[in-house]
Amino acid sequence: TVVRGANAQGKTNLLEAIYYLATGESPRARTDRELINWLANEDLLPFARLEGRIEGSEDLREMSIVVQVKDDRLQKEIRINGVPRRSTDLGGQLKVLLFMPEDIDLIAGSPDARRRYLDAAISQLDRRYARALSTYSRVLVQRNSLLRQLRDHYGDPQQLEFWDERLTEQGSHIVHARLSTVATLHQILQDIHPRLTGGAERLHLLYRSSLPLEGANSLLAYRQLRFEAPHPDHSAEGSDEPSQAGIKEVFRQQLQEHRQEEIERGMTIMGPHRDDLRFLVGGVDMCVYGSRGQQRTIAIALKLAELDLIRAETGEEPMLLLDDVMSELDEERRRYLLDSIHGDQQVIVTTTDLDPFDQSFLDSAATWTVAEARIEPLAR
């Protein structure tokens, strides 16, 4: 499906709605309150509602999300086949892969953006991961609050033991899942990235943990970021991942060793919330020293690798959402991206004009137009 429209007409809102229905999170809005249309704010009870019917490999699912402001408080109601559910239950119901122009900045952007990318990718494949992530975030808030109290000389430091146990339990699951996913993505990228670079470059994914874990695919990454060649023990390729139990024990020890420092700073200074994903070509960190072209190529390769990962893990074709990215790509990369789309895959592409698309592609696609937030078939 190709959706054409001028800027600020609602193309991205369409893709945002699909992504939100699949994940319970917006790729753009900072809060759910921002998702409610301004016109709805004139109502007594402002709300936004999404509904979708998803045909999977086994059944047909009906999903809905209602975001409502009541007594100046935001409420979110999620239903799957009419049954109330939590946000973490959305994972895997509708598998989507969203590629936006902003994703090209993923490589050069902040560590927080790269962590969010990993978390969103893994949560679609592992509901337990989504629950662990949610629990970890809540525990982290509580632990940091206690650390600030202890910094101000209120309370007993032994109170940290309870929160340390919960933090390491959930945090070890998160780190282990991230390491496994990064290692798998790395292997997939060894086929994809050379095709996009004519075999001139080889990409290494690097998961930089704040924990000193032995045997992790890239945890002793400092030497690599100092332009040394990737060490065989620390590249994602062919490495042995630490066990979740091993990660938990190291995490627990580090919290004990740095307890006084954390109290003085009033914050948790290590854990998956401080980790990062980096990209090396020839031992050089592309997040810092990569050209715009290199970073754009890595972003495309990463999305295509994620596409293959979802196929391999679930046996299903994820819905692919491409938000006006064709204009960002040269002809060769545009053709490679379109060739990677399978005939059985559902794809929605937004664009301001149809020029970047081959006629054969348009002949096989449904075309729609968006104007003033209304979608209608496009006569061609």
Image (cartoon, rainbow, N blue to C red):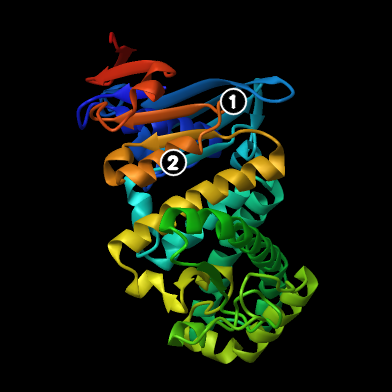
Going by the numbered disc 2, the residue's amino acid type is Leu
Q: Quadrant of the N terminus?
A: top left
- Residue 28 visible at all: no
Q: Which residue is drawn at 63% across and 60% down?
A: 187
- Work out whether 129 lies above or below 90: below
- Work out whether 14 lies above or below 335: above
Q: Position of residue 287 (x, y in %)?
A: 38, 70
Of residues 293 and 98, the one nearer the viewer is 293
Q: Which mark is residue 175?
A: none
Q: In this view, does 169 lie to the left or right of 284?
A: right
* Numbered label tally: 2
SS at badge 2: helix
- Work out whether 208 lies above or below 174: below
SS at badge 1: loop
Q: Residue furthest top?
A: 379
Q: Position of residue 60 (x, y in %)?
A: 67, 18
Q: Is residue 221 left or right of residue 286?
A: right
- Work out whether 138 lies above or below 371: below
Query: Disc 1 versus disc 2: distance between alpha carbons?
Result: 15 Å
Residues at circles 1 and 2 in contact by the CB criterion of under 8 Å? no
> Mark 2 or mark 1, which is nearer the start of the sequence?
2
Q: In which quarter of the image is the C terminus?
A: top left
Q: Which mark is residue 337?
A: 2
Q: Which residue is drawn at 66% across and 45% down?
A: 125
Q: Residue at x 54, y 71 (%)?
A: 206
Q: Provide the residue designation for mark 1.
A: 344
Of residues 177 and 330, the one nearer the viewer is 330
Q: Which residue is drawn at 71% across and 25% down?
A: 57
Label 1 crowd bin: few (<14), some (14–19), many (20+), radius 10 Å:
few
Going by the numbered disc 1, the residue's amino acid type is Asp
